[in-house]
Image (tube, rainbow, N blue to C red):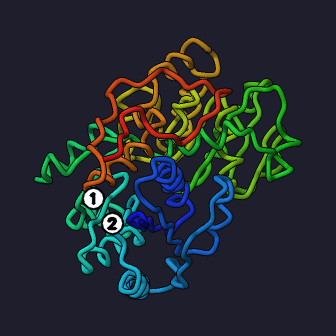
Amino acid sequence: MALPEVHLVAGTCSEAVKLAPVVLAMRSAGLLTPVLVAVDERIAQTLTAFDLAPDVTLTASVETDPPAELISQLDELWAGRPPAAVIVQGDTMTSLAGALAGSWRRIPVVHLEAGLRSGDLNPAFPEEANRRLVAQLTALHLAPTPLAAMNLLDENIATGDVLITGSTAVDATLAVAGRRLPFENVVLERARTDRRLVLVLVQSSTAPLLPITILIGKYPDIEVVLTGTETAGLDRVTITEPLSYPDRSRLLSEAYLVLTDSGDILAEAPSFGVPALVLGESTEWVESLHAGCAKLVGSDTDLIVREASALLDSRLRRDAMAAVGNPYGDGLAAARTAQATAALLGLAERPEPMPSTQAPTVNQSAPVTFGRAPWVSKK
């Protein structure tokens, strides 16, 4: 007898990374058939880090086509191949399109990484609106943290529809970094030395070149890997294009300190014991700030240099930030997600939520797999 299909919709490489552990956990549990639906052909390359490939690839482009085109293609797919449930991830237009198409087809929608809130409904940044709209269409809200779950309860989402799972970004980065894959970017292989590594990984904001210049001059024992910016040939600074996921995970596992404006990095860094300085004026990933494994420094040069110097001057202070653990996950989020989805469909018991206290750090040399969590049981 065929197992019920669950379609996992990925429109960006980040979504694919966070959904990949769920696919593997579902396969391991043996209760559901995961079907990974890709909305971008570039996703196939990202999935190779997990030895996966898309099961369905749509032709809509999340960058150039109107949202209606993606909704139409998903609706056509599910009209002919209706899944038992649909999983969408995060806050992109793909997530909203998947939730809308699933809801219209009366397919239960599971929202992974539910409940994050920034409070900023500026139309120029649609993520907050997407998150809130998806919440109205969701049958099962899988929150990465207690704060995210509380946000949902404050919006009158029923308690029984919310589960704290942790973030599957943690599962993914631990697994990929644990494989110690060779660098895809040969420049990184040549650049790595025994110096302390400072990573500068930026998306929306401009890389802080002046603070980097100051820090390089102040600390001869550091090297910097920086994405997405041209510089005037600074010594011990390696400039790269945006990193592949395996390269990023490996570098993060080797870093002393990371400066970033990426929520994904904030979720991953604490699992490797790497403190983060958060560029930009705000972040919806506030749990890392509350826990103390990250500090908000904005774009002020003096503040960036001061906070980075404090950590570079004192290993004790740096390790104190790292010792608080990862508020975003314990490496079992994918297993909880797989079981919770099966429970939604009446095929398993509801899993226990993620414990509120996390281990301080994760053994980087230990192999990580996506097996069943100890509480998973079949009916």
Find residue 92 and report its horizontal and vertical position in percent.
41, 66
**Residue shown at the point (74%, 38%) measured from the top left:** 180
Q: Which residue is mark 1?
A: 345
Q: Judge from the rendering whether residue 206 lies leftward or rightward of residue 351; answer left or right.
A: right
Q: Residue furthest top?
A: 316
Where, by quadrant of the figure, is residue 41 drawn? bottom right
Q: Residue furthest right?
A: 190
Residue type beneath disc 1: Leu
Q: Which residue is mark 2?
A: 85
Find residue 15 and report its horizontal and vertical position in percent.
49, 60
Query: Which image quadrant: the N terminus?
Result: bottom left
Q: Is residue 106 visible?
A: yes
Label 1 element class: loop
**Residue shown at the point (41%, 47%) measured from the top left:** 281
**Residue shown at the point (89%, 42%) measured from the top left:** 190
Label 2 element class: strand
Q: Are marks 1 and 2 in contact (CB under 8 Å)?
A: yes
Query: Quick one: label 1 or label 2, which is nearer the N terminus?
Result: 2
Find residue 373 and report its horizontal and vertical position in percent.
43, 36
Residue situated in front as seen by the camera: 62 or 59: 59
Mark 1–mark 2 distance (CA, rounded to whole Å): 8 Å
